[in-house]
Each structure stands twice: as structure tokens, then as C-alpha cells.
Amino acid sequence: MNGIHDLGGMDGLGPINPTKEEPCFKDDWERRMFGLFVSCFAGGHYNVDEFRHAIERMGPAHYLETSYYEHWLASLETLLTEKGVLTQEELDARKKHIAMEDA
Amino acid sequence: MPHDHPHNKPMSDVELRVKALESILTEKELIDPEAIDLIVETYETKIGPRNGARVVAKAWSDPAYKDRLLSDATAAISELGFSGVQGEDMVVVENTETVHNIVVCTLCSCYPWPTLGLPPVWYKAAPYRAKVVKAPRGVLEEFGVSLPDDTEIRVWDSNAELRYLVLPRRPDGTDGMSEDQLTELVTRDAMIGTDVLAAH
């Protein structure tokens, strides 16, 4: 698929800014996202090709503007709703509920 | 209701989405949060570049092992117990006086988890993925690495089926060191190809 993710050779994306050392996960949500990916994969909800394809289907600007684990989040939301494991309505409702509980 | 975080600021949208996902999947009994804890702990504390460093140290110390590593990396790495998820098929590429190898995944973030753990942010981000296949010398400069003009640089693009590990050159001044001592010298970046190991 010749999408935005096919970055090899592209110019103008800025400096690499490598860090010598950094924590494995920057935020706790990244930690949970990693674990969710592995768990749902182990549960047979998708294979790795489907997982990557769902990332490759993100809008190009959105792909470039979001962080790595946000790509994983977008992929899981896409695949799990497409496969009928859960619905966007359930996700939205749960988000609201958690936000209210947190306030 | 108890909260598990200090009340500094409201949760970000991304945080809420992840919590919602975990909450619903747990409720539907499709995941177990304790399993997630264990998965996270494994990759944060147990699986990391020290594994790859052991492979490198052994290759430096044992010529027969090095031969096996270069001809069938998957099997040789398995000998040390480092096989499995995201490292099912491995190739090891050797740096020499005339050839320097560097590894990327231009399409996503393919990386040999069993030997190197999870990849650093820069490896997964757009700038490295875009630039290294086109201008590897410039990339190495951003990493503070300068190679002679006549060194051949080979860039290996990983994919879903195949992962690469660079066998760095053994630094000068390390004769007689034990494998344990040599393991300490091998950096993660040297095994990706964005570092060269200084003389000891």
C-alpha cells in the first residue's frame, strides 16, 4: 500500500534528535496500550498484518502528527469496531464515564 | 471512588481512550489487566539490549559461534535462549574494516525484540525512517559517528518476516576480556548500527 507510512527517502521531515537513553514508555497510557496490543493479539482478534494495515489506513496528516502509541490506539479502535468486538458508542460512553469519575 | 493518579490536570483525550478500551475489554472478559501488568513488566525490565550484547560478546569470543551466527542467526541466537515474538527470523550483519551496517524499518518499526527489547522513539519516528535509506552518512553524523569516506555503508530495511542485528567491530584493547566483560561494552545503538564502539 503506497501510503504516508512509506517514508523511505522522503525529505523535509526534520532532525532525528536521538536520545541516548529514555524510559521504555513515556506515559502510563503508553504502557497500557502496549499491553492491550499484545493481549488482543494473543486473543486472536487480529494478526500483525491487519494491525499494520489499520495504521496505514490512518489519514496521512493524522499519521504524521500523532505519536507511535497513538498509532497503535487508532489501529485497535479501528479493528475492534470493524470486527464487532465493541462499538464506537460503547467507547465514547465509557470515555465520558471515566472523565466524570475523574473530575 | 478511589483514584489512581494525582489531581494535577484532567486526563488527556488519548489517556481517556486507552482507559475506555481497557475498561470495556476487561468487562467483556477479553483481556486480563493483570496479564497486561506482566507483559509490561517483562518488556520494561527483562527483555532488552543486554540480550543482544551477550550474543555479540560470544561471537567475539568464540569463532565457531560467530560462524554459526553469520550463517544461521535465528538458530545461533536461539542457542542463548533469545527467540520468540518479533524475532522469529533473524539475520546478523557483520561490521568490518571496510563495511558498516545500519538497520531501519522504513514502513513501521520492525525491530528484533528478543535481542534488543523495544525500539527507541527515534527508530520508530519519521525522520530516521525517511533519511537513513537515502543519506546514511548524514544520519550517522547526527549520532556523532564519523566513518572513513571509503567505508561501504549498507542499509538493511527490516520487514514483518525478517529482522536484523548488527555485529559491531570488537574494540581495540579488549584482548583477554571475558564474555561478561565484553557484554558490558556493547551498546544498543552499536547493534542497530548508529554507534561504533570506542577503543578500550
Image (cartoon, helix red, strand yellow):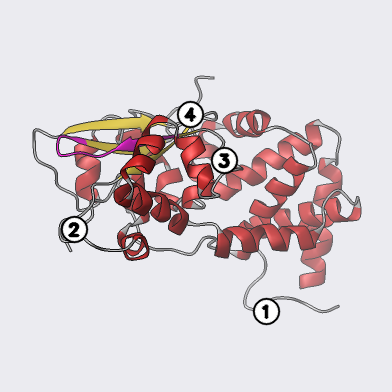
* Residue occupied by mark 4: A4
Marks 1/2 same chain: yes
Q: Residues in magenta?
A: B91-99
Badge 2, how many Cα within 10 Å: few under 14, some, many 20+?
few
**Percent coordinates x, y for residue B103 in the rendering:** 36, 38
**Percent coordinates x, y for residue B197 in the rendering:** 23, 55
* Residue occupied by mark 2: B198
**Of discs 1 and 2, which sits in the foreground?**
2
In the rendered image, is residue B5 in sight? yes
Badge 3, how many Cα within 10 Å: few under 14, some, many 20+?
some
Marks 2/4 same chain: no
**Of discs 4 and 3, which sits in the foreground?**
3
**Considering only order in the chain, which callout, 3 or 1, is on the residue closer to the N terminus?**
1
Mark 1: amino acid? His
**Considering only order in the chain, which callout, 2 or 1, is on the residue closer to the N terminus?**
1
Secondary element under disc 4, as helix, strand or loop, is loop
Secondary element under disc 2, as helix, strand or loop, is loop
* Residue occupied by mark 1: B7
Mark 3: amino acid? Gln
Marks 1/3 same chain: yes
Tell me the subunit letter for badge 1: B
Tell me the subunit letter for badge 4: A
